[in-house]
Structure formats: structure tokens, C-alpha cells
Image: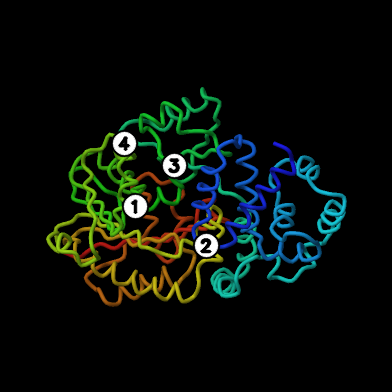
Amino acid sequence: MHPNALLDLTTDLVRQVLRLDMPADTVVSTFFRHNRNLGPRERHALAETAYAVLRKRLLWSHLAASGSGAMERRLAALAWQGTDSFMRSGLGPHEQKWLAEAQKVDMASLPEKLRHNLPDWLAGALKAELGEGFWPLVESLDKPAPLDLRVNVFKAKREEVQAELKEAGIEAELTPFSPWGLRIQGRPALQKLPLFIRGDVEVQDEGSQLLALLVAAKRGEMVVDFCAGAGGKTLALGAAMRNTGRLYAFDVSGHRLEGLKPRLARSGLSNVYPAQIAHERDDRIKRLTGKIDRVLVDAPCSGLGTLRRNPDLKWRQSPKAIDELTVKQTAILESASRLVKPGGRLVYATCSLLTRENEAIAEQFAQAHPDFELLPAAAALSGVQVEGAEALERAGMLRLWPHQHATDGFFAVAWQRKN
């Protein structure tokens, strides 16, 4: 495709993602369905440029203000993630001169807001949380996340999967913490590989794997994944149970549970029972009161721990939305806790960076429920072969940060119900 035509397409995609009226990954997927003639390299350049615009939207908008023509075209040129010479050949002489001048700007001299590229409310909250760790976090969020795989331990062994990937020309390293994980750089076409088709692996961030490990589901138990979604953690729990016992996958969204079906078929698991519920007080949940060995509440949250993958979230979330989420999180945790039998384990988790969605919810629950005692995360994870678990714990709870642990941002706390 001619450089100017590709730049025009990128401009159109940037315009669409900046509407912020739906998740960026949905916009990108829809765009590619409407432009099936694009090759792999072209698709990569377009998608990564769109995400790069979202990551540094404030900076690029500031630099683009000095140019002329369509703003989205200038943003695409500044954030371009394909071959630089190819993109430049699609620019006119005046555009090339403008771009060269814009790229000479000393970024370190710009105001903080243009360097961290976060909305004020989020930057303030993260500075208060992290102090000197704020800028290392910002730097980590500017980089795309690696691709983590979870080996389905019901069907395969990690070293054998690693060797099969190498035979396919894909280098994978062991994840440093999760005993189930492999990490790949880049975005190889895994879906066509026999090991993916067989269900030996699933794409899952190492942090998400650690949440499932904290639940520590065992053979023959009754387990509930209370907010199962498309079932990434459900499948990890089912494999850990070695396809025994009974694992309920609850969610209010039938559409999300539909996404679990093909993955469940690949996994080889028959101990998983997906069920759509109306709300956290659904009658089918009440029937399980006091009967469940392990309950995971992977609560609906802001998703701000996934900004490396979903940079649009920082522009689509708001303090008001967080207020609404914390009310929902509290109600869901309260209802889910009733399922746990004496001696059973309850895990509350989010993929958020914010204390309000994490420690604040946990502390509120603990104060209201003296019948639940905290299980220190490091000890619980060490018991399921997680190496270096001490580095993952803060105040007895699991706290994962992109800049410290190379995972998405996750929080989890585990309690045991007293006998």
C-alpha cells in the first residue's frame, strides 16, 4: 500500500479511537474487519500507532498544535509505530519540516502533565500512592505489555510447551513468579499452533495467574468464580483442581460467559459450570450459602492496572465512575462472602491501581466481618510453588505493579473463615 494511503487509514483509525465511545480494542478489531486487505505489518503499524496516540495523547496534542491540516493526521505522524522512512515518504514537504521541528522538542523541559499523560485526578491518586515510584510507573505504562501464556497444567507441562514453542520459532521464557507461566516478546500468531488448538495454553497475564494461585483451589473442592467474565481465571482454577470437584462460573453477563465456551472446550475441563446470574443476590447463589470451599471475587473495577494494554481507559474512566464501582464492589464482596463455609477461603481481587478499589474495600470488609481472618499473601503463594512471593506482598495483601513486577497492576487479599 502507498505510504500516503496507509497514513490516511491510520488517520481514520486514530479519529475513531479518540471518540472514546467504546473500548479501543473493539474499535481496532472492527476497523480491521472493514479493511481486510491490510497485511500483518500494516495492521501492526496501524494498531500500535493508535495505542501510542492514546498513551501520550496530551503530549502529541500539544506538539500537533503547531502544524496544519487534520489534527488526527498530525497525531498519527507523531506517534507512528511503523517504519519511519515509509511514513515520512507519505508526508508533504511542509509536513516533513513540521514533524522534524516537533521531534526536536526537549521532552524533559515540558510540564509534568505532558510527560505523564494522565488525567489530573488519576495522576494525583497515583502520586499519593507511590511517591517516588510514580515516574517509574509512568515509564512502564508507556511500553506495550509482553505476551504471557498460562500452561494448562491439566493437559501439559510448562517445559514441554516451552520446547514446542521453540520448535515453532518462538522464544518463550519462564515467568519469574507463576509456575504456570511463559512470557513471549512480540505478537506471534499463536492461534494457528497445534498447542493452542489442543488447549495446552491460554493467553493470560502473569498477574492474573497469581490471583488464581492465591485461591489455591484443590482436587475435589467446591469453588466459585463469582465474576467469571470470559473465564480466564476460571480455567486456571479448573486445571488446578485437576478437573475434579465442582467449579461454578457466575457472571451477570451472558455475552461474557459465551466467550468462555470455546476456551472451555479446548481446555478439556468438565468440572466447570457456567451460569448467568441476575445480580449478586440471585437465588441460585443463596442455595450455596455456607457450602463453598473457595470463592474468588474478581470484582468489576476501573481496569487501570491494564493501561499498558488498554491506554484508552485512563481517558474513559472518571472519579464518578470509581465511586459507582466501589459501591458495587462492596455489595458483591458482601454477597460472595456468605458462600464461604467455615475454614474456607475468600479472595477479593481487582486489576486496579487505586487504593479506593483495593485496600479500602478490604479494610472495610475486614472491620465488618471479624469471622474472616487475613491470610498473608506471601505465605499462601509460597504454599503453591510461587517463587519470590515476599516481593509481591504489602501489608499481608498481594500488590502487583507494572514497573516493579512486569505484570499488569493487580490487587488481591485472601481471608479464611473461622470455624
Question: Where's residue 145, x and y in %?
Answer: 56, 48
* Separation of marks 4 and 2 at Cα, in angstroms: 30 Å
Q: Which mark is residue 203?
A: 3
Query: Which one is earlier in the sequence, the residue at label 4 or at label 3?
Result: 3
The residue under the point 42% across, 61% down is: 411
Question: Where's residue 351, x and y in %?
Answer: 44, 59
Which image quadrant is residue 34 in?
A: top right
Instruction: Name the residue carrying label 1.
Output: 256
Q: Nearer the viewer, mark 2 or mark 3?
A: 2
Instruction: Name the residue carrying label 4.
Output: 267
* Crowding near the residue tagged with mark 4, few <14, some 14–19, many ≥20 C-alpha atoms within 10 Å: many
- Left or right placement of residue 236 versus residue 170 in this view: left
**Nearer to the camera, 10 or 124:** 10
Q: Are marks 4 and 3 in contact (CB under 8 Å)?
A: no
Query: Which one is earlier in the sequence, the residue at label 1 or at label 3?
Result: 3
* Crowding near the residue tagged with mark 1, few <14, some 14–19, many ≥20 C-alpha atoms within 10 Å: some
| Outermost residue to the left | 287
Q: Say what secondary structure mark 2 lies in.
A: helix
The residue under the point 37% across, 32% down is: 200
Q: Which mark is residue 313?
A: 2
Q: Say what secondary structure mark 3 lies in.
A: strand
* Separation of marks 2 and 3 at Cα, in angstroms: 21 Å
Total number of numbered discs in the rendering: 4
